[in-house]
């Protein structure tokens, strides 16, 4: 999994994450529409969204009170898979492109 993002500082305002998802294995690209992206902190479900047919997604949540954020993808025949864990965000607007 290749992920490009800069994440460091805790935020108390909503964080808006948007980006593009693509697969290393191009045969999986047809499964992109409807793929789910999930943000959690521990057992707390913070946000979830579906990827559109072009591979774009958007997540919004308030990270206040949480220290570590786990991002997963699942659906369309894929088991729930950890993308990355991060500690805080350096900005409210985060562009995060994912290569799975």
Image (tube, rainbow, N blue to C red):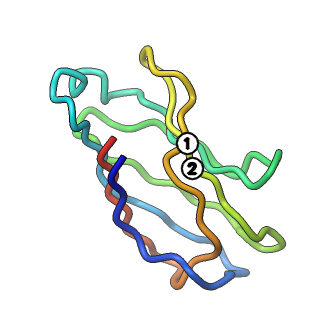
Residue underneath mark 2: 71
Seen in the image, is 50 located left or right of residue 89?
Answer: left
Residue 40's x, y, as percent?
70, 50
Label 2 and label 1: CA atoms lie apart by 6 Å
Instruction: Out of 3 and 20, give the one closest to the viewer.
Output: 3
Q: Position of residue 9 (x, y in %)?
A: 62, 85
| Looking at the image, residue 32 lies above or below residue 78 | below
Q: Is residue 84 above or below residue 48?
A: below
Residue beneath disc 1: 82
Furthest residue in direction left, as rendered = 26
Is 8 above or below relative to 28? below
Q: Do the residues under discs 2 and 1 have CB atoms within 8 angstroms?
A: yes
In the rendered view, would you say 19 is above or below 7? above
- The furthest residue to the front: 1
Residue at x 58%, y 60% (from the top left corner): 60
**Is residue 29 found left or right of 75 in the rendered image?**
left
Q: Give the secondary structure at mark 2.
A: strand
Question: In percent of the image, x 68 and y 82: which residue is there?
Answer: 10
Q: Nearer the viewer, mark 2 or mark 1?
A: 1
Residue nearest the viewer, comparing 61 with 2: 2
């Amino acid at each position: 999994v290749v992920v490009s993002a800069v994440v460091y500082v805790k935020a108390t305002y909503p964080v808006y994450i948007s980006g593009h998802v693509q697969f290393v294995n191009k045969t999986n690209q047809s499964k992109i529409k409807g793929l789910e992206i999930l943000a959690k902190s521990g057992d707390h479900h913070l946000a979830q969204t579906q990827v559109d047919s072009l591979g774009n997604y958007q997540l919004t949540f308030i990270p206040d009170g949480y220290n570590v954020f786990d991002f997963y993808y699942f659906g369309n025949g894929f088991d729930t898979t950890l993308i990355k864990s991060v500690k805080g965000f350096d900005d409210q607007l985060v562009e995060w492109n994912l290569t799975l």
